Amino acid sequence: MKKIVVLAMVFMVLVGCNQGASQFEGEGYILEVADQRILVVEKDFPGKSWKDIMNEYSGGAVWLSTKKKGLRPGQKVQYQIRGGIDESYPAQAEAKDIRIINEGKK
C-alpha cells in the first residue's frame, strides 16, 4: 500500500513540475528577417532567400511577426504561436515566444 502512495506522490510531483514548462509548438531555421517578421523553415539554406528556394521547397514554412531583437538568418529557433495561424504558404502567425537554440554561422 505504501508503494502505491509513494508512486502516486511521485507522479503528482512530476506532472506539477511539467505544468510551468514552456511548450514550444514549432522549430526551424530562420531563412529571412524583414520588418519585425522572420521566415522559419525546416532546413537551413545558408545564403538563400525564399525566392531562391520556393519553387523546389516542400517543407513547412511560417512568417512569424515578432519584436524580438537579434534574430538573423541561419539561427535555429523554437517558437510559440499567439492566436491562430493563417494557412497561406508560407503560413503567417504572431509569435508569443521565440527561443534561439543554435546561433548558426555568423
Image (cartoon, rainbow, N blue to C red):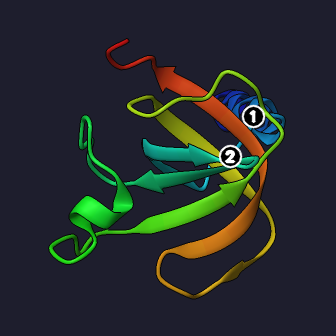
Residue type at mark 1 is: Ala
Mark 2, Cα crowd under 10 Å, few <14 / some 14-19 / many 20+, is: few
User: Which structural element holds mark 2?
Assistant: loop
Left or right: 34 in relation to 77 = right
- Residue at the outermost top position: 106
User: Which structural element holds mark 1?
Assistant: loop
- Residue at the outermost left position: 56
Residue type at mark 2 is: Gln
Quarter of the figure that contains the C terminus: top left
Q: Residue at x 56, y 76 (%)?
A: 91
x, y percent for residue 104: 36, 20
x, y percent for residue 9: 77, 31
Q: Quadrant of residue 10?
A: top right
Q: Residue at x 55, y 87 (%)?
A: 88
Q: Is residue 28 above or below residue 103?
A: below
Which residue in the protein does label 1 denote? 21
**Mark 2 to mark 1: distance in Å?**
6 Å
Q: Which mark is residue 23?
A: 2
Asked if the residue at tag 1 contacts the one at tag 2, i.e. Cβ–Cβ closer than 8 Å, the answer is: yes
Left or right: 105 in relation to 77 = left
Q: Nearer the viewer, residue 33 or 4?
A: 33
Q: Residue at x 24, y 35 (%)?
A: 46
Mark 1, Cα crowd under 10 Å, few <14 / some 14-19 / many 20+, is: few
Q: Nearer the viewer, residue 26 or 19?
A: 26
Q: Quadrant of residue 53?
A: bottom left
Q: Nearer the viewer, residue 63 or 3?
A: 63
